[in-house]
C-alpha cells in the first residue's frame, strides 16, 4: 500500500514523537493514501512553521503483514465511534485500548467547526455525525508503534513546489 506524508522537511526515517497538542488518533506517525492531501498538508505545515519547504515523503506499507501481526483500529466512516475516539484524543483524554495502527477519516479544517461545537455542547452527537456525513473526508493512517514503523519502507521524497 502506497502512503504519503506531508511536511516541511523530508522524512526518510519516521519516528514516534510525543506531540504537544492533541491529534485525531493520538501520538503516531501520520500518513494518507491520498497524495493530494499530503501535498496540501505539506504546504500547511510549511506555512504554519514558517520554515522549510513543502515536501511529500512516499512510503510502501506492508498492510498484509500488519493485518496478520498488529493491532489495527479501522474506522470505515466518520460515525459515533470515530467521533468519540477523535474527541478523546484531541482532548488528550483517550484511555482505551492501545493500537499499533489506526485508520480513518481526517478531522480537517472543514469538519473542525462541527467537532468543536460537539465538544462545546452546542451540537448533539447525532447532529455532529449528520454534519460529518455531509463532508467529503479524506483518510489518514496513523502508525502508533515501533512495530508498525518497521513495516514502512521509504521510497522517495519530492518538493511540491517543483
Image (cartoon, rainbow, N blue to C red):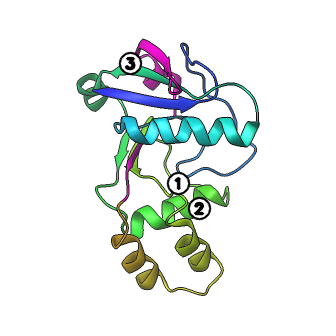
Q: Is residue 135 above or below residue 46?
A: below
Q: Which residue is mark 1?
A: 96
Residue 93 image position (x, y, % from top left):
65, 59
Q: Secondary structure at mark 1?
A: loop
- The residue under the point 40% across, 71% down is 132
Say whether marks 3 and 2 touch (CB < 8 Å). Answer: no
Q: Secondary structure at mark 2?
A: helix
Residue 145 drawn in magenta: yes
Q: How many marks?
A: 3
Q: Is residue 160 above or below residue 47?
A: above
**Residue 94 visible to an observer of this rendering:** no
Q: Secondary structure at mark 3?
A: loop
Q: Quadrant of the N terminus?
A: top left
- The Cα–Cα distance between marks 1 and 2, rounded to whole angstroms, is 10 Å
Image quadrant of residue 90?
bottom right
- Taking depth in this image into account, of 77 and 50 the one nearest to the observer is 50
Which span is picked out in magenta?
137-162
- Taking depth in this image into account, of 55 and 93 the one nearest to the observer is 55
Q: Which mark is residue 151?
A: 3
User: Which mark lies nearer to you, 3 or 1?
Assistant: 3
Residue 77 image position (x, y, % from top left):
31, 60
- The Cα–Cα distance between marks 3 and 2, rounded to whole angstroms, is 27 Å
- The residue under the point 58% across, 46% down is 26
Identify the mark nearer the N-term, 3 or 1: 1
Residue 34 image position (x, y, % from top left):
35, 39
Dot 2: few (<14), some (14–19), or many (≥20) neighbours within 10 Å? many
Say whether marks 1 and 2 touch (CB < 8 Å). Answer: yes
Q: Which residue is mark 2?
A: 88
- The Cα–Cα distance between marks 3 and 1, rounded to whole angstroms, is 24 Å
Amino acid at each position: 500500500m502506497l502512503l504519503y506524508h506531508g511536511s516541511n522537511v523530508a522524512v526518510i526515517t519516521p519516528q514516534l514523537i510525543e506531540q504537544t497538542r492533541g491529534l485525531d488518533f493520538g501520538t503516531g506517525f501520520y500518513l494518507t493514501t491520498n497524495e493530494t492531501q499530503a501535498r496540501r498538508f505539506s504546504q500547511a505545515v510549511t506555512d504554519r512553521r514558517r520554515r522549510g519547504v513543502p515536501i511529500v515523503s512516499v512510503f510502501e506499507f506492508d498492510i498484509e503483514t500488519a493485518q496478520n501481526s498488529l493491532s489495527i483500529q479501522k474506522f470505515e466512516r466518520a460515525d459515533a465511534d470515530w467521533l468519540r475516539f477523535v474527541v478523546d484524543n484531541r482532548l488528550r483524554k483517550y484511555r482505551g485500548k492501545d493500537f499499533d495502527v489506526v485508520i480513518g477519516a481526517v478531522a480537517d479544517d472543514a469538519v473542525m467547526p462541527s467537532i468543536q461545537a460537539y465538544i462545546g455542547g452546542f451540537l448533539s452527537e447525532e447532529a455532529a455525525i449528520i454534519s460529518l456525513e455531509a463532508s467529503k473526508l479524506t483518510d489518514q493512517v496513523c502508525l502508533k508503534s515501533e512495530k508498525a514503523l518497521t513495516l514502512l519502507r521509504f521510497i522517495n521524497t519530492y518538493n511540491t513546489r517543483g
